[in-house]
Image (cartoon, rainbow, N blue to C red):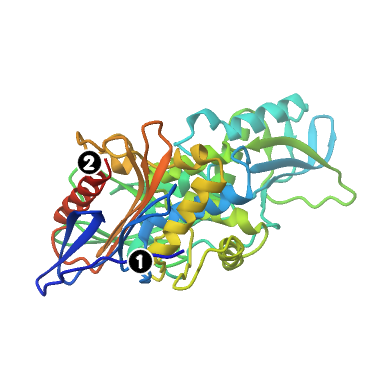
Amino acid sequence: MKRITFISVISLLYSFFSIDAAAGSIVEFQLPSPAVAGVYIEDIITGEVLVDVNGGRSLLPASITKAITSASVLAEHKPDYRFATEVFMDGNIANGVLDGNIVVKVCGDPTLESSHFPEYLGFADSIVVALKQSGVTEISGRVLISSEDFINQPVPSGWVEEDFAWPYGAGHFSTNYKDNKFVLTMPSRKSEPFVPGLTVKYTPSKGGLKVERKRDSNVYMLRGSVRKGRQEIALSNPNPEETLRHDLESKITGQGIVVGDKEKTVSGATRQVLYVHKSPELGEVLRSFMFRSDNMMAEGALRILAKGETREKAIDRELRLWELRNIDTEGVYLEDGSGLSRKDRMTPYFMADVLGWMASHYNASDYVSLFPKAGLDGTMKSFLKDSSLEGKIAMKTGSMRDVQCYAGYKLDEEGFPSHVVVFMINNIKGNRAKIKESIEKLLLDTFACEE
């Protein structure tokens, strides 16, 4: 695709990009130094490039990576795809006794008992109902979690240690449960839900409370002062598999069904399907994590691209998928599906080409519906609020330290995408609010020129 870049002025203290947005019209884009911007706006129908500043520059994308993950998954799977978690009775039943174990075969479903999908809650209750319907009053073995078809890689290598403790830094496991987070109450150190094997080390000191957890560790280190009475802290769960097992056994025994204290091996045992839990449809999952910018769910979606294989294999397939659609992946390097990795890189051209392909070749309404609308939804609720573009810009936001990005569409009067819009700002040292204002002004000026 032929692209033309318009840049007329760059100063030392501020970067002023004067851009020929339309014939005879000039708009300006201002950034505090030393910020670097990649900006690209293109008319999907005509192919006319309205704005191109550093479109080929490789930049850190942050959470707009989720728009690539969503596009990749939808290009390969229908929106009604569902994760399936199967539960088996592994053993023989006689006189109400299951001589064996309950086996939960997990599949990496990131939504199991998620608070964001309340209509799909009740996993443990459904298992209890199925056991009673099967006449089981006692299980000689235990509840086992089977992840034989899934390679566990909870946290991508590019995620940094400061993120591991918090819910936004929760890893994606073969078993994911209750959003892989828990609430720690201090000073009692109680966890809800209960996290088996959790260790909390607290060092009282002056100042605010700081929380740390190392990669793949069950140890939380707290330092600082705890509020008088009690203080609740939402944290990432390092062991959702054991939390699920604990909750299932507690629910089963709480309903009067006896559960043994160790795994039971039974030769010649039969395996019977007890219950199959289906997740929300893929389209619902994508929309949820795009609106809320949920990193763990985005990682779960990425892994659909290479079932039973590694995250690296999923990313390889993702990039190959776009190369086969004649989209240039030069300057693109990804380590995850969420954009939390600080090693991720992509160009505005790549992002724009994927957005354009999805609008032109895929059922555009399904994909566009994943993006929050300016002034109305999710992370875009305050963006362009009460302006002429409220509801007419649909974009995924992406932010982390020194980074602010936006990617999505300008919509026409019928709500269909008319333009692709990409902003990637790196190395931010100044006022982030002023950068947002500059982006809003550029959009308002650019599309005022189009009218």
Q: Residue at x 31, y 44 (%)?
A: 379
Q: Neighbour class for label 2 at 10 Å: few (<14), some, many (≥20)? A: many
| Direction from residue 31 to residue 318 in the image, left or right | right
> Marks 2 and 1, Cα distance to the nearest angstrom?
24 Å
The reply, left or right, for residue 315 in relation to residue 139 is left
Identify the residue under disc 1.
55
Q: Residue furthest front?
A: 24
Report x, y in % for residue 345.
Answer: 41, 69
The image shows residue 10 at horizontal and vertical percentages of: 15, 71
| Residue carrying label 2 | 384
Q: Which residue is at a point 50% across and 69% down the rendered structure image?
A: 329
Instruction: Identify the residue at the far top of this view.
Output: 133
Label 1 packing within 10 angstroms: few (<14), some (14-19), many (20+): many
Q: Earlier in the sequence, mark 2 or mark 1?
A: 1
Q: Examine the rendered structure and indicate whether residue 346 appears above or below residue 451.
A: below
* Residue reaching furthest to the left: 13
Q: Nearer the viewer, residue 14 or 44?
A: 44
Residue placed at 52% from the left, 45% from the top?
Answer: 177
For the point 63% across and 47% down, the residue is: 77
Residue 27, percent from left and from top = 18, 55
What amino acid is at disc 1? Gly
Left or right of 62, for residue 386: left
Q: Nearer the viewer, residue 27 or 436?
A: 27
Closer to the camera: disc 2 or disc 1?
1
Q: Quadrant of residue 316?
A: bottom right
Question: Please, what is the three-letter code of the amino acid marked with disc 2?
Answer: Leu
Q: Looking at the picture, how far across and down is residue 413, in whole percent?
A: 36, 32
